[in-house]
């Protein structure tokens, strides 16, 4: 009987200590981890302001690549959601939802998961830093409330090792991923590049001439464009075709000294109404003797697109800007980029040339 009483007293003491310590422990936990990147502020913000690349850097989906995931709500900004469901008990299920978004400053996310605590929230605060503010500091914070849940307060003792380690891991993966994106600030590109969007492009008939690799000298490039357009015009005349849009240049490679490209033009039969849907390949084409012109049926596709006003030599930066804009949104570019010469060949070699740039995406 005495032994039983001693056991009960010991249990009471342990329970009292558990209660006292639990009451003393914090009712909430707050963590902050920081990392620095040399990518442009617009790239960092756009990457964090949606969940398209979330699985590429965040620790939660990387813990179980086989987990079921779903993105809901708007494509970016407040209301965008990421839901996951893992058969791995250590990962469980839950969701992340953007609840506050301040351009180039803050992305706040509400978290629901199987871990103890309520009102879970992580924030990414962005701040220019480094020499001449060329870098961006990403400060990720995490806050969780336990209230009077004593078990939760004890669980809070391990938040730094559990959540904190995940934050460090995720931020390291994030900076590595950002490093693969061209460092072009498409948001403030001299106000020359506007209207960045994903365009739906219908199927097209295309006549083109591979111009090959030429010295990147304005007169040389212009002469090649005009000569190859002449061949295309002859082919149209002999085949009963008319232009279905402006000339375009398809780029294979642009360097400082050389430029490799194709001269191309979308076409349609003169007998067809303008804007008629393309339903199959063109037949009965007649190519003049010695013509370098080739024909291709382009299928309907999606492409990143933007309007640009400037000089032809700036187009390489425009292409990099399309890549930089696509990457944070989880858009994978494919094939070769091209520019529609809205102001023709004459305008292309002036400082106010007008172009519409395209790069197809998968």
Image: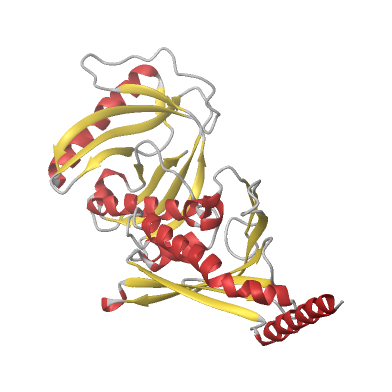
Quarter-of-image position of residue 162: bottom right
**Coordinates of residue 141 in the picture (x, y in percent):** 52, 74
**Coordinates of residue 291 in the picture (x, y in percent):** 24, 19
Residue drawn at 64 percent across, 80 percent down: 28
Residue drawn at 71 percent across, 80 percent down: 18
**Coordinates of residue 175 in the picture (x, y in percent):** 38, 61
Please state if 272 lies on the left or on the right of 338 as rendered. right
* Near-viewer residue (51 or 204): 51
- Whether 24 is drawn above or below 176: the answer is below
* Near-viewer residue (198 or 241): 198
Q: Quadrant of the N terminus?
A: bottom right
* Near-viewer residue (293 or 21): 21
User: Can you see residue 98?
Assistant: yes
User: Can you see residue 101?
Assistant: no
Please state if 187 lies on the left or on the right of 316 as rendered. right
**Coordinates of residue 156 in the picture (x, y in percent):** 62, 74
* Near-viewer residue (259 or 284): 259
How many dots with numbers?
Answer: 0
Residue drawn at 41 percent across, 37 percent down: 245
View extreme (right): residue: 1
- Whether 129 is drawn above or below 236: the answer is below
View extreme (front): residue: 2
In this figure, which colouring scheme has been used for the structure?
A: secondary structure
Quarter-of-image position of residue 337: top left
């Amino acid at each position: 009987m005495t032994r039983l009483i001693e056991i009960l007293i010991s249990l009471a003491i342990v329970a009292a200590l558990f209660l006292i310590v639990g009451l003393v422990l914090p009712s909430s936990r707050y963590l902050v981890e920081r990392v620095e990147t040399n990518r442009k502020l617009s790239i960092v913000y756009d990457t964090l302001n949606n969940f398209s690349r979330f699985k590429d850097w965040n620790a939660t989906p990387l813990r179980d690549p086989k987990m079921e995931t779903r993105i809901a709500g708007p494509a970016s900004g407040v209301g965008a959601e990421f839901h996951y469901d893992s058969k791995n008990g250590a990962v469980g299920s839950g969701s992340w939802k953007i609840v506050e978004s301040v351009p180039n400053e803050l992305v706040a996310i509400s978290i629901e998961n199987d871990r103890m605590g309520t009102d879970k929230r992580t924030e990414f605060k962005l701040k220019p830093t480094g020499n001449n503010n060329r870098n961006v500091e990403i400060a990720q914070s995490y806050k969780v409330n336990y209230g009077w849940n004593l078990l939760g307060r004890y669980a809070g003792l391990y938040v730094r090792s559990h959540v904190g380690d995940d934050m460090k891991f995720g931020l390291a993966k994030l900076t590595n991923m950002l490093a693969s994106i061209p460092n072009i600030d498409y948001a403030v590109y001299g106000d020359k590049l506007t209207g960045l969007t994903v365009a739906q492009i219908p199927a097209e008939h295309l006549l083109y001439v591979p111009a090959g690799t030429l010295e990147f000298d304005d007169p040389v490039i212009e002469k090649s464009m005009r000569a190859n357009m002449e061949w295309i015009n002859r082919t149209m005349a002999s085949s009963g075709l008319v232009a279905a849009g402006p000339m375009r240049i398809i780029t294979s490679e642009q360097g400082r000294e050389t430029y490799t490209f194709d001269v191309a033009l979308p076409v349609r039969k003169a007998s067809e109404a303008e804007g008629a849907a393309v339903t199959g390949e063109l037949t009965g084409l007649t190519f003049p003797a010695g013509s370098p012109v080739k024909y291709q049926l382009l299928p309907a596709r999606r492409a990143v697109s933007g309007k640009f006003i400037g000089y032809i030599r700036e187009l390489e930066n425009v292409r990099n800007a399309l890549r930089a804009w696509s990457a944070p949104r989880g858009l994978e570019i494919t094939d070769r980029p091209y520019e529609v010469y809205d102001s023709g060949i004459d305008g292309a070699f002036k400082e106010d040339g007008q172009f519409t740039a395209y790069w197809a995406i998968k």
